[in-house]
């Protein structure tokens, strides 16, 4: 009997010396508990999840140098060194991850070209369409964003603009043309141009 007690007295301090515990709670930046957070040692299977009140207890193997990871969908993952948090009571704050903005691609279509070509020409070269013309206007590409009520026009080719009144032809690079139709009676337009060459007729 004495041998059994002595053996227990020897084993128990040894077990206590290798037992390593991390405990605490996981909350958001509003101090509200976060449940079902995956809490684990990086690279091995040891882990647990936080309870409904955000609390957790994790028993670690001895001589562990792995990082401790707190991970949950829609939150930024938090990682810390186990040596810094052993046998301590923690309060881990997880921050909501920023939502990725959805990129909406607005197509350039023939229908938009037909609907807005006259508006574009009036805004871009004026109302004298008999004497001022874009000779390759079919190369223009039109896109209309319904949600923002914005018209965008691009010119993959250099535009050839003929002005019969002034007797010359101009080559222009159209970088960007945009019109905002939020103001129904007075759309706001702007465009960027690069003049390349002017040829006398």
Image: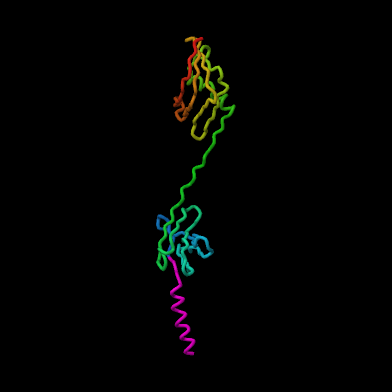
Report the span colored magenta. 1-23
Return the x and y of residue 161 as percentages of the image width and height: 51, 16
Question: Compared with residue 98, is residue 80 higher up or lower down, i.e. above or below?
Answer: below
Judging depth in this view, the residue of 67 and 186 nearest the camera is 67
The residue depicted at 56 percent of the width and 27 percent of the height is 112
Question: In this orientation, which residue lies closer to the viewer: 150 or 163?
Answer: 163
Comparing 91 with 112, the one in front is 91
Q: Is residue 29 left or right of residue 172?
A: left
Q: Residue at x 48, y 26 (%)?
A: 175
When the figure is inspected, residue 19 is found, relative to residue 66, above or below; the finding is below
- Determine the residue positioned at 42% across, 66% down: 86
- Residue 14 part of the magenta segment: yes
Magenta stretch: helix, strand or loop mostly: helix
**Quadrant of res 187:** top left
Image location (x, y in percent) of residue 44: 53, 63
Q: Position of residue 18 (x, y in %)?
A: 45, 73
Query: Residue at the right extreme?
Result: 110
Residue 129: in magenta span: no
Q: How many marks?
A: 0
What residue is drawn where x is 54% and y is 36%? 105
Coloration mode = rainbow
């Amino acid at each position: 009997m004495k041998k059994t007690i002595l053996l227990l007295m020897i084993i128990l301090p040894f077990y206590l010396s290798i037992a390593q515990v991390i405990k605490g709670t996981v909350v958001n930046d509003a101090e509200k508990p976060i449940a079902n957070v995956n809490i684990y040692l990086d690279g091995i299977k040891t882990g647990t999840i936080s309870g409904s009140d955000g609390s957790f207890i994790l028993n670690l193997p001895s001589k562990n140098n792995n990082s401790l990871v707190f991970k949950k969908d829609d939150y930024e993952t938090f990682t810390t060194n186990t040596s810094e948090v052993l046998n301590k009571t923690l309060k881990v704050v997880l921050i909501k991850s920023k939502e990725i903005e959805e990129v909406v691609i607005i197509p350039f279509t023939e229908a938009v070209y037909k609907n807005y070509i006259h508006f574009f020409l009036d805004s871009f070269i004026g109302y004298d369409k008999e004497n001022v013309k874009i000779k390759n206007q079919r190369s223009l590409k039109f896109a209309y964003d319904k949600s923002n009520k914005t018209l965008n026009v691009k010119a993959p080719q250099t535009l050839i603009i003929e002005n019969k009144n002034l007797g010359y032809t101009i080559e222009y690079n159209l970088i960007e043309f945009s019109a905002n139709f939020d103001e129904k009676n007075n759309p706001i337009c702007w465009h960027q141009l690069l003049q390349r060459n002017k040829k006398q007729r």
